[in-house]
Image (cartoon, rainbow, N blue to C red):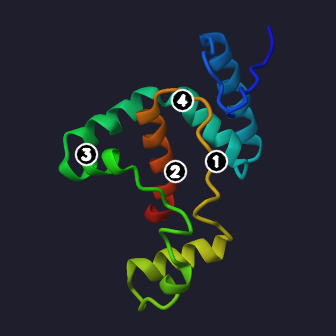
Amino acid sequence: WVYPSPDEDGMYHDLSRFQKLAVATNSAFTALADPMRADAVAALGEVTGTMALRGMRNKMINDSIGQRILSDKPIVNQQSIHFDELQKCGTNTFGAAYYSFMEAHGFDPEGRDVVKYIEDDELSYVMLRHRQCHDYWH
């Protein structure tokens, strides 16, 4: 048995259950040893989160705004979030809180890991969207 290697597109295609278990185990131990290893946390979520992602997608499908998000597939990046403008937002606004959180932690909206272990395009987008919106909830 060989630990999976990515294809030229950076994706891990057709992993067996055993390979997914190996990725999950390795990622879990790595994340426990060093919770700052976002790559390990991301990989663990991808190989173990299929049911949760399907649930999120189904909720989005059953909501008009969710349907639009799935259709348009907006991305949180430096083109869609203008940090220089957020810095100017008044106190007690979402923009100011988001800017302060990202600045205080040295985060970049484009700094989230690329989805590597989810082959379904729609579920892959749901995972990416979840990662990108995660910082909003802080």
Q: Nearer the viewer, mark 3 or mark 1?
A: 3
**In this picture, residue 110 sits left or right of residue 79:** right
Q: Is residue 103 left or right of residue 53?
A: right
Marks 2/1: CA–CA distance: 8 Å
Q: Position of residue 135 (x, y in %)?
A: 51, 62
Residue 84's place in the image compared with 46, above or below, is below
Which amino acid, by three-letter code, is at mark 3? Gln
Q: Which mark is residue 33?
A: none
Name which residue lies at 56% across and 73% down: 101
Q: Are marks 3 and 1 in contact (CB under 8 Å)?
A: no
Q: Which residue is mark 3?
A: 67
Distance from disc 3 to disc 4, alpha carbons, whole Å, reads 20 Å
At label 4, the amino acid type is Ile
Q: Secondary structure at mark 4?
A: loop
Measure how far apart labels 2 and 3 are at the Cα level: 18 Å
**Residue under numbered circle 2:** 131
For disc 1, the marked residue is 113
